[in-house]
Image: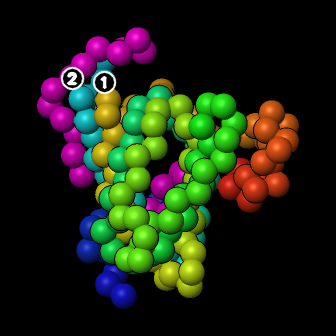
Amino acid sequence: MKDWTAALGLEPHGEGGYFRRIYTSPHSMQTEHGPRPSATSIHYLLDEKQPSGHLHRNRSDILHFLIDGGPLEYVTVDPDGELHRTVLGAEAERFLLVPGMWWKASRLTGGATHGLVAEVVTPGFDYADHEFATRDLLDELPHIAQELAGFVRA
């Protein structure tokens, strides 16, 4: 396996895994929460040391493109509380859209040693638009709490 962390200059990510921002649009747009770049992009890596990402959501839409490795399982929860599972990998999908305000988490699956993804966020990412799930979310979604519990930070 190529050492993507060194090759791409990735750093630990608060969601789990590793990342580096690779693009911020020079064009901004006004949102109800203030100005945002029209798009941002990161490389995001899960590996055997960091095999999963914590459950979180963003106000913006996020496009995920599998570049190398996998399979990766994405667990998403729509605003109606419905659980969705998508696998990105050579034998499955290679692209996933997670609409704004959907909860999402990811993990290596199927014996994968790593999964490298490029993410495009539009409007662009701002930490003010980001929220980690807490144990309170599990109380709000008792019908899927057991499936989400492993993705919620302690």
* Picture residue at 59% right of the left edge, 57% below the top: 85
Q: Is residue 91 above or below residue 75?
A: below
- According to the image, label 1 marks what residue? 36
Q: Is residue 28 above or below residue 112?
A: above
State which quarter of the image contains the N terminus: bottom left
Q: Between 91 and 38, which is closer to the camera in this rendering?
A: 91
24 drawn magenta: yes
Point out residue 91 in the picture as x, y percentages from the top left corner.
41, 77
* Picture residue at 45% right of the left edge, 37% below the top: 99
Q: Secondary structure at mark 2?
A: strand
Q: Is residue 123 visible?
A: yes
Counting residues from the N terminus, which is met first, the one under dot 1 or under dot 2?
2
- The image quarter containing residue 89 is bottom left
Q: Which mark is residue 16?
A: none
* Picture residue at 85% right of the left edge, 41% below the top: 142
Q: Is residue 46 visible?
A: no
Q: Secondary structure at mark 1?
A: strand
Answer left or right for 2 relative to 128. left
Q: Are marks 1 and 2 in contact (CB under 8 Å)?
A: yes
Mark 2 surroundings: few (<14), some (14-19) or many (≥20) residues within 10 A: some
Q: Between 67 and 128, which is closer to the camera in this rendering?
A: 67
**Distance from the alpha carbon under mark 1 to that under mark 2:** 5 Å
29 drawn magenta: yes
Q: Which residues are magenta?
A: 13-34
Point out residue 150 in the picture as x, y percentages from the top left corner.
74, 59
